[in-house]
Image: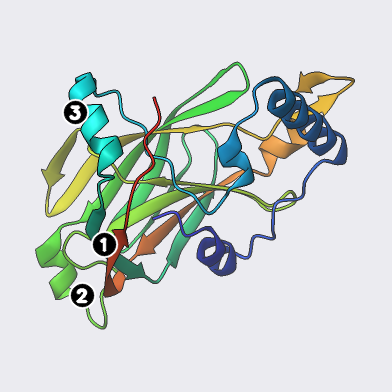
Amino acid sequence: MDARPALRSVLGVPELIPDVETQAWWKKMRADRKQAEPDPLLDTPDRLRLRSGLRLPDSVVAHLRETPPSYRANLSVDVVRPTVMFELPAKLGDWQARDAHGVRVIEKSTRDFDLNFELLLSEPISFLRELRRGAPLFRGNDVCAVVAVQRSTGYLVPNIRSSSPFLFVGGVMLSRRSFNISPPRIVRAGAWQSQPSAWFDELKLAVVALPVVGTLSHELTADRFELSR
């Protein structure tokens, strides 16, 4: 669902432009943190660490250390082809629709540096999709993403459809979705700064269909674990 390169391609959004001073500040912060709290896993990026809050008896831990467990999982991956439906300004009251699929910004607020949107979404249910001529953009439970886009800086954040209150009206499902975004902050003289107002004026919300065009499966195995407490 987090297919940033594909979304950037179909939306024509360039790569995020880093701020030099902010990047230098983060680099210094990471170096200071690494020196204060060294983590050997940071020097071994090929390792995967799994965390668990499960408490085990000492006897069980001792047994696991003597006989390191193996791991096997079957992974199933859906391949999607992003399709842009429409874009609209990220402003209160704005509305856009296509093929019974629409979005309206019904609430907009700010908290600290974050932007919070409440969106009213409409989308056709299955039998209406079957009535459309040509290849449907949506099939079954295919999902749709609302994407925050700011092209001049390359900012892009998708919000995947999640469970929310909904009702059916005339073959269309209406639902309400919360969308929170954190505009990239910049550092000046060691302090966080908000983006200028022009940044927000250029912000758009894009609605992107994510029809599944194929599925891949793969078996993942790990021969052993290294336990740490």
Q: Which quadrant of the view contains residue 195?
A: top right
> Residue, x 54% and y 68% (percent of image)?
10
Residue that carries the numbered disc 3 in the rendered image: 60
The spot of residue 6 in percent (x, y) is 51, 66
Residue that carries the numbered disc 2 in the rendered image: 132
The spot of residue 215 in percent (x, y) is 26, 73
Give the mark nearest the N terminus, 2 or 1. Answer: 1
Work out how far the residue at label 1 is from the one at label 3, CA to CA, in angstroms: 28 Å
Seen in the image, is 137 located left or right of residue 140?
A: right
Residue that carries the numbered disc 1 in the rendered image: 75
Q: Give the class, few, some or many, for how many residues have Cα within 10 Å of label 3's Cα (few <14, many ≥20).
A: few
Q: Which quadrant of the view contains residue 144?
A: bottom left
The spot of residue 125 in percent (x, y) is 15, 57
> Residue, x 26% and y 83% (percent of image)?
134
Work out how far the residue at label 2 is from the one at label 3, CA to CA, in angstroms: 59 Å
Question: According to the image, what is the colour scheme of the structure?
Answer: rainbow
Q: Is residue 153 above or below residue 138?
A: above
> Residue, x 72% and y 31% (percent of image)?
30
Q: Which quadrant of the view contains residue 53?
A: top left
**Type of amino acid at the residue the image marks with label 1:** Leu
Q: Give the class, few, some or many, for how many residues have Cα within 10 Å of label 2's Cα (few <14, many ≥20).
A: few
Secondary structure at numbered mark 1: strand
**Type of amino acid at the residue the image marks with label 2:** Arg
Secondary structure at numbered mark 3: helix
Q: Give the class, few, some or many, for how many residues have Cα within 10 Å of label 1's Cα (few <14, many ≥20).
A: few
> Residue, x 37% and y 39% (percent of image)?
50
